[in-house]
Image: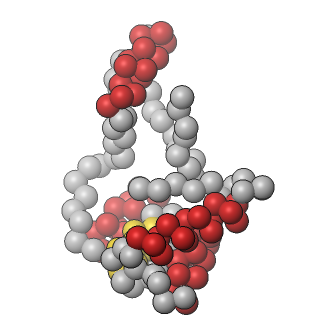
Amino acid sequence: MWAIDVRSKTRRWANSLAWLKKVRAGHYDLVVDLQRSDHSRFLLTLLWLAGSAPRIRVGNRGGLPYTHQPVLRDPRAHAFPMMQSVLQAIGIPTRTLHPVLYPAPDRAPFIEQLRREHGLNENDYVVLLPGRLPHIR
């Protein structure tokens, strides 16, 4: 999984170009785009037009440049069922009823410390990722 910062006013296009180069150099067979953004669709379209897009391109919105699309395509639908539908379109079963995030093993002590400091149990909080991955230091 790669995250690129496309909201940066100074680095948006440099970050996008770095992503294009990385995908092109990787000669991947599959890209799964879980975003509903025109930016990720645009980047994949550029790869497709250049003849260097992955053979299988699965997208949340369907249509070009994607080769597979989800059954659920209602733009008013919640993001999680939409993402599940994208994965199901290529035969990946989705068994969870809600998103589950697992921290990297090296971050577990830090997370446990935060829980203790704030008196939180495992089910007392929720983490929101509004459109991008956080950077926890």
Res 135 quadrant in image: top right
Please give the name of the residue rendered at 41% of the width and 56% of the height, measured from the top-left corner.
Answer: 1
Evaluate whether residue 53 shows in this view.
Answer: yes
**60 or 106: which is nearer to us?**
106
Residue 65 position, x and y percent, is 49, 84
Please give the name of the residue rendered at 55% of the width and 71% of the height, measured from the top-left corner.
Answer: 20
Please give the name of the residue rendered at 47% of the width and 56% of the height, measured from the top-left corner.
Answer: 2
Numbered-mark total: 0
**Figure check: 127 above or below 8:** above
* Image quadrant occupied by the C terminus: top right
Please give the name of the residue rendered at 68% of the width and 63% of the height, measured from the top-left corner.
Answer: 14
For this orientation, the residue located farthest to the front is 25
Q: Is residue 22 left or right of residue 112?
A: right
Residue 117 position, x and y percent, is 48, 9
**Figure check: 134 above or below 114:** below
Res 55 quadrant in image: bottom left
**26 or 117: which is nearer to us?**
26
Colouring scheme applied when the structure was drawn: secondary structure
Residue 25 position, x and y percent, is 45, 72
For this orientation, the residue located farthest to the right is 10
Q: Is residue 97 left or right of residue 22?
A: left
**Figure check: 121 above or below 136:** above
Residue 127 position, x and y percent, is 48, 35
Evaluate whether residue 73 shows in this view.
Answer: no
